[in-house]
Image (cartoon, helix red, strand yellow):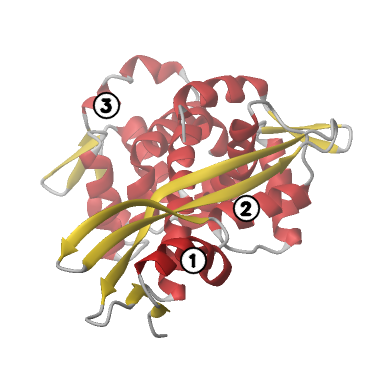
Amino acid sequence: MEKIELRYGNMSEFEEFFPRHLKSRVGRGLYITSKTKAGRDRYKYKIGNSFPDIIDDLKTNKRTVRFHNFRTLFIADVRKTKGGKVVVSLPERDSIADEMEKRLESIAIRSESALLETIYDRIVDIASVQLAMTPIKEIVVSIHRNGELDFKEFAQKRNKTQALRYVEFLAGLDYITKEDGKLLPGQQMKRSGKLKSLEDKELYQKFLSEILAKGYGYIQDYLHLTQIVPYLRVSNSYFLPSHASGELLHLSEDEIRKHYRFYYQKSKPIIKIRGQVNEVVEAKIFEREDDYIVGNKDIWKEYSKAVGSL
């Protein structure tokens, strides 16, 4: 697609009509934030966007409208021709829309980080998350039981490159070390030596929670264990609008789906949302209150402290 170009008869006409045209022809929430001279008869205008986030509590019928203000979404290039006319060049519409998506996604990601700090010990209780983390469990439990694990034995069951990634990941967090083909306890695991009386499952849950909290980005991007992502995003699609409204909301699966679509700019079938919400309820991240979904109060308190202002 081509860049957007607007033309005006003179500077006065530009100053009068350009702010209106930004809203009517490009996007309703757009506004001018600043102007700088960029040369003879040339100017750069920073264009911001104010984007409404509409949040409804289904039990109280209270509506909150929170505006996300992005003060520099893109730059408008403005130049005067020799004849005194004004030509405005703006980015392509798709480019503006993509930038808007990135800004919303950045809010969601910051919220996810704060939320993960408070729910990592619960999200690991979800069956598909546990299944995805099986290779990490295998390493941790084997070393805890036997004091070591032969790397070749571990790599036999999977692709060697992938096996190395798991080892490098855990070594990077100081949970294990690798010496002469053997995987041995690292300092983090040694510090938990006093927990030997625990059942393996309990110990593994503790390790897995810590590992998930410290290495979520790596787990997602390099180990490609994307099974964790849907549950974190569904949880975030409840707690982020609650943060915007300032209180725990009473929502339905449809409302959570609406917020998911807003923050992530992606649609998800309601049947998937319902299934993931049920698993998040079982993990005690959400609760059911009559016909509504409500966040866990303890998680809400910790998340509210961690998230700050978005």
Kind of element beneath mark 3: helix
**Where's residue 39, x and y in %?**
14, 65
**Where's residue 109, x and y in %?**
44, 46
Q: Amino acid at mark 2?
A: Tyr
Per the image, the residue denoted by label 2 is: 260
Quadrant of image for the N terminus: bottom left
**Where's residue 169, x and y in %?**
27, 46
Kind of element beneath mark 1: helix
Residue 102, relative to residue 113: is it above or below? below
Is residue 304 found left or right of 272 in the rendered image? left
Per the image, the residue denoted by label 1 is: 17
Residue located 46% across and 30% down the image: 309
Q: Amino acid at mark 3?
A: Gln
Q: Amino acid at mark 1?
A: Phe
Instruction: Residue lying at the far top in this picture: please name it.
Output: 194
Instruction: Residue lying at the far bottom in this picture: please name it.
Output: 1
Residue 293 visible in image = yes
Residue 223 visible in image = no
Q: Residues within 10 Å of mark 1 (few under 14, many from 20)?
A: few
Between disc 1 and disc 2, whose residue precedes?
1
| Nearer the camera: disc 1 or disc 3 | 1
**Circles 1 and 2: CB atoms closer than 8 Å:** no
Kind of element beneath mark 2: helix
Q: Quadrant of residue 138?
A: top left
Between disc 1 and disc 3, whose residue precedes?
1
Residue 188 numbered mark, or none:
3
**Where's residue 257, x and y in %?**
70, 53
Instruction: Residue lying at the far right in this picture: please name it.
Output: 290
